[in-house]
C-alpha cells in the first residue's frame, strides 16, 4: 500500500496553533482534523508530533504492539511529578512488573467493597453544602480526592487529607504552567522547588504508613486499600510503591473531578435529565444505609451510567494521549516516523461523524440497547480511558465513582445551572469546563 508523508500546517499557522493549544486544545485539534484529515503533523525536528484523530486511525494505532511505542520519552514531564519508578513513565519489563503488581488492587471484589465508602463520603460532602450559589467543580474535586485517598492510601491517612490535597494541587498547577517554567533546574524558591518539597512531604507520610503496614504483615485480613495491597504483594521496592500510589492519586483525581464537572454540566443543561436521574436514584438507592449498596445497585443505575458515558464521549478528561513512536509506522495511509510524539485524541474519536450520528448532541439514549454494529463502532471510538494494555488502570473505579456520585447528588440536591450553554473547555493536561459548574443549590425538601 502506498503511504504518504504527514500533512502539516505552514509556519505562520504553526505559530498561531502553538499559542492556543496549551490552553484551548480542542479547537486546535478540530481545526487540524478539518483541514488535514485523520492524521497530521504539528511541530518539526526533534519536537515533531503527529495528531491522530479519526476513530479509524485511532483504532489502527491502538492495535499496534505495545513495543512500537515508548512512554519514558523526553517529552514526558510526568516523571518529575510521579517518580521515575511509576508505571506510566515505564516501558518493557519494568512496566509489566509494576502494572502487574498494581492490577490486583483493582479487582472486582475490592472495587465493590469501595461502593459504600463512595456513597458515605458523598453524603458527608452534601451535608456540608449550604443552600445558595456555589461552584460544584471544587466541591466535586474535594469529594473525589477524599474518596481516592481512602481507597488508595487507606483510612489511616484520612486525617491528612487537607494537607495531601494542598500538596497535590502544587503539582497540578505546575503541570499546567508554561513549558518554560517546567525546564529542569535545581534552583530553590521556584515552582519546581515547591513541587519537589511537596513530593518529599508526601513520601514521608507514605513511608510512615508503609512501615506500619510492614509491621502488621502477619495480619490475615486482606487489605482494603491499594497501598496495603502493594506492601503485602512484596514485589516492588518502597520507592516503587510510593511512585505507584502517587501516580494513582495524581493522575486520577483531577481527571475524575473534571469528568464529574462535565457530567453535571451536561445533565443539568438537558431538560428533564436531573429529574429522571432522581427518580432512578430513588428507586435504586432509596433511603437505605450506604452499606447496602453493591454491584447490583450499580447495574441498576442505568440512566446515570449512560449520562456518564455520553459526557465522557464528548468531554474526555485527556483530550490527547501522548506516546513516542519507537518504529516507523503506517496509520491511515500516512507514515509516522520513529521518534515522533504521537498525540492520539479521545476527543476527536468521540466526536467522529463517521461513527456517531449527530455527534455533537448530548444523547444518553444512544447507549440504550445498541445493535451489534453500533456497539462495535462505539467500543472502537469511545476511548476516554484508552485501550489495554496501557489503558487507565483505575478506569472501572473512576466510572463507578462517577455513576454513584451523580445518582446521589441528583437524589439529594435541587440544582439549577447558572448558565444556559455548554462552557468553553479549558486545559491541556486536564480538560474541564471554563468557569467551573456554577449553580444554585439547596437540599431536597
Image (tube, rainbow, N blue to C red):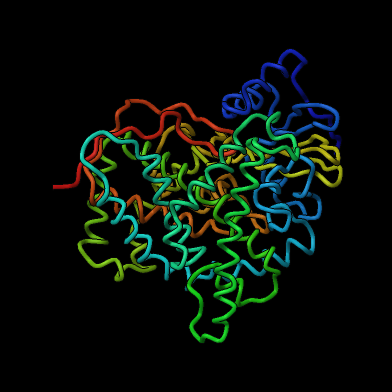
How many numbered marks does the figure carry? 0
Choose between 382 and 86: the one closer to the eye.
Answer: 86
Is 405 drawn above or below residue 318 in the view shown?
below
> Which percent across, then down, holds residue 289?
25, 67
Residue drawn 39% across and 65% down? 115
> Which percent across, then down, holds residue 170?
56, 42
Residue drawn 29% across and 29% down? 418
User: 124 left or right of 2?
Assistant: left
Choose between 136 and 397: the one closer to the eye.
Answer: 136
User: 336 left or right of 224?
Assistant: right
Outermost top residue: 12
> Which percent across, then down, holds residue 331?
77, 40
Asked whether residue 54 is in view, the answer is no
Viewport quadrant of the N terminus: top right
> Which percent across, then down, holds residue 271?
27, 35
Is 90 drawn above or below residue 425 in the view shown?
below
Amino acid at each position: 500500500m502506498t503511504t504518504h508523508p504527514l500533512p502539516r500546517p505552514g509556519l505562520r499557522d504553526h505559530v498561531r496553533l502553538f499559542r492556543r493549544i496549551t490552553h484551548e486544545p480542542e479547537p486546535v485539534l478540530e481545526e487540524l482534523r478539518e483541514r488535514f484529515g485523520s492524521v497530521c503533523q504539528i511541530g518539526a525536528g526533534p519536537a515533531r508530533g503527529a495528531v491522530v484523530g479519526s476513530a479509524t486511525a485511532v483504532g489502527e494505532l491502538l492495535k499496534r504492539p505495545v513495543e512500537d511505542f515508548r512512554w519514558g520519552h523526553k517529552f514526558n514531564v510526568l516523571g518529575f511529578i510521579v517518580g521515575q519508578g511509576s508505571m506510566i513513565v515505564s516501558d518493557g519489563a519494568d512496566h509489566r512488573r509494576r502494572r502487574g503488581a498494581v492490577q490486583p488492587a483493582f479487582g472486582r471484589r475490592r472495587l465493590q467493597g469501595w461502593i459504600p465508602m463512595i456513597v458515605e463520603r458523598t453524603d458527608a460532602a452534601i451535608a456540608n453544602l449550604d443552600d445558595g450559589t456555589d461552584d460544584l467543580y471544587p466541591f466535586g474535586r474535594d469529594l473525589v480526592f477524599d474518596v481516592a485517598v481512602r481507597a488508595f492510601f487507606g483510612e489511616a491517612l484520612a486525617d491528612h487529607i487537607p494537607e495531601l490535597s494542598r500538596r497535590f494541587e502544587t503539582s497540578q498547577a505546575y503541570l499546567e504552567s508554561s513549558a518554560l517554567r517546567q525546564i529542569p533546574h535545581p534552583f530553590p524558591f521556584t515552582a519546581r522547588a515547591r513541587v519537589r518539597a511537596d513530593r518529599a512531604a508526601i513520601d514521608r507520610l507514605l513511608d510512615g504508613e508503609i512501615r506500619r503496614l510492614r509491621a502488621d504483615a502477619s495480619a490475615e485480613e486482606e487489605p482494603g486499600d491499594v497501598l496495603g495491597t502493594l506492601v503485602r504483594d512484596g514485589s516492588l521496592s518502597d520507592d516503587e510503591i510510593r511512585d505507584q500510589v502517587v501516580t494513582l492519586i495524581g493522575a486520577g483525581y483531577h481527571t475524575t473531578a473534571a469528568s464529574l464537572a462535565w457530567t453535571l454540566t451536561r445533565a443539568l443543561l438537558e431538560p428533564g435529565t436531573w429529574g429522571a436521574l432522581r427518580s432512578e436514584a430513588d428507586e435504586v438507592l432509596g433511603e437505605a444505609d450506604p452499606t447496602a449498596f453493591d454491584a447490583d445497585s450499580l447495574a441498576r443505575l442505568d440512566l446515570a451510567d449512560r449520562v456518564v458515558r455520553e459526557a465522557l464521549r464528548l468531554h474526555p478528561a485527556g483530550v490527547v494521549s501522548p506516546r513516542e513512536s519507537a518504529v516507523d509506522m503506517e496509520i491511515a495511509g500516512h507514515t509516522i516516523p520513529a521518534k515522533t510524539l504521537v498525540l492520539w485524541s479521545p476527543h476527536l474519536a468521540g466526536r467522529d461523524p463517521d461513527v456517531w450520528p449527530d455527534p455533537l448532541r448530548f444523547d444518553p439514549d444512544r447507549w440504550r440497547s445498541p445493535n451489534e454494529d453500533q456497539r462495535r463502532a462505539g467500543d472502537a471510538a469511545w476511548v476516554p480511558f484508552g485501550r489495554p494494555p496501557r489503558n487507565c488502570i483505575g478506569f472501572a473505579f473512576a466510572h463507578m465513582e462517577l455513576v454513584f456520585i451523580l445518582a446521589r447528588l441528583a437524589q439529594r440536591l435541587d440544582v439549577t445551572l447558572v448558565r444556559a450553554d455548554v462552557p468553553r473547555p479549558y486545559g491541556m493536561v486536564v480538560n474541564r469546563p471554563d468557569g467551573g459548574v456554577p449553580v444554585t443549590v439547596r437540599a431536597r425538601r
